[in-house]
Image (cartoon, rainbow, N blue to C red):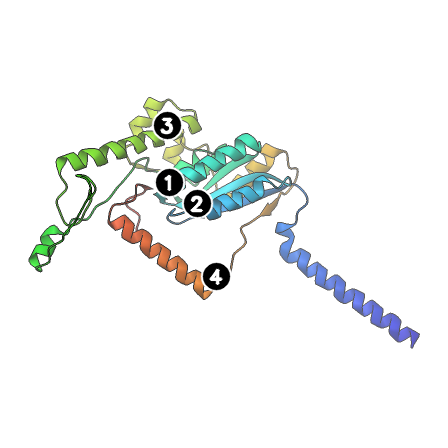
Amino acid sequence: MKRKRVLAGLGMIVVVLAFFSAILFFTARELPFGDRIAVVEIKGVITQSFNVIEEIHRYQEDDGVKAIILRIDSPGGGVGPSQEIHREVMKVRGEAKKKVLVSMGSVAASGGYYIACASDLIVANGGTITGSIGVVMEFTNLEELLKKIGIKGVVLKSGEHKDIGSPFREMKPEDKKIIQEVIDNVHQQFIQAVAAGRKMDRAKVAEIADGRIFTGEQAKQLGLVDSIGNLQDTIDIAAKLVGIVGKPSVVYPVKKKLSFWDLLFNNMASAMVEILREKGFELNYRLSLAHD
């Protein structure tokens, strides 16, 4: 009887050890000890900043995370969200004194590059599409089409320029002037962000800030990128910068399982963003060649 109890106890210990070993194996990347490097993904069109900023804050407050790598694979997006993420990256570097590096994927253009220039160091693949330093605001005029099908749009407004961008009428010269002034102002903000982040002469940045795109190699020659390499190269560079000896422990983004309601909400939100974009109500740091 005693022997059976001993064997049962040993069996239980083995099961418990196996259980905890499995947990350690599958969650080692999120364990709260040791010097680590965290990877934050910025993928697709940038329509909101909350999720990215939330991740950045989590790693900012984690003393075990010595450096943060932003893995950017995005053609850009809304001006507001891009500027919000850019600002938080600057805070991490200034307040938390943590290194923030950028690893560019296939594309890191416009708003994607706006965010990147807030970092300590940018690494791009040789064929990464980047740059596109500019602003775009698109409008659709349906006036002639509506006339052909016998529909007339009616707009009631409180001021002369309240319906700027309306699809029911041609844009007047004074309307275009107002919109252009807004675009030019936001464009200058982009140029200033690049000049400050990359420590480049503002006039030199302005020369190439006409919306053109560059490969990673071209961007490096222009001073927009620091090094050519992939994500693993960026991890190795980050480890050296913060003094991690040997192979660094890397915290990757946790893939969240979305419920039916999450997917429905996300689809509805994306649809609303597209509607607003088509109506011209959103300023974009976005690569115009990209299909959203």
Rendered location of residue 227, percent (x, y)? 47, 34
Q: Which mark is residue 49?
A: 2
- Comparing 71 with 226, the one in front is 71
Tags 3 and 2 touching, CB below 8 Å: no
Q: Which residue is mark 1?
A: 80
Question: Residue 159's image quarter?
Answer: top left
**178 horizontally vs 186: left or right:** left
Instruction: Classify mark 4: residues with Cα within 10 Å, few (<14), some (14-19) or many (20+).
Output: few
- Mark-to-mark CA distance, 4 and 1: 26 Å
- Comparing 290 with 143, the one in front is 143
Q: Is residue 172 visible?
A: yes
Which label's residue is closer to the chain start, 2 or 1? 2
Tags 2 and 1 touching, CB below 8 Å: yes
Tags 1 and 3 touching, CB below 8 Å: no
Q: Is residue 115 above or below residue 3?
A: above
Residue sitting at x 52%, y 41%: 69
Residue sitting at x 83%, y 72%: 8
Q: Which residue is mark 3?
A: 192
Which label's residue is closer to the chain start, 4 or 3? 3
Rendered location of residue 282, percent (x, y)? 30, 44
Which label's residue is closer to the chain start, 4 or 1? 1
Q: Is residue 129 visible?
A: no
Question: Residue 84's image quarter?
Answer: top left
Tags 4 and 1 touching, CB below 8 Å: no
Q: Secondary structure at mark 2?
A: loop
Q: Which mark is residue 258?
A: 4
Looking at the rendered structure, the kind of residue marked 3 is: Gln
**281 horizontally vs 143: left or right:** right
- Comparing 74 with 162, the one in front is 162
Instruction: Classify mark 2: residues with Cα within 10 Å, few (<14), some (14-19) or many (20+).
Output: some
- Mark-to-mark CA distance, 1 and 3: 16 Å
Rendered location of residue 170, percent (x, y)? 12, 44
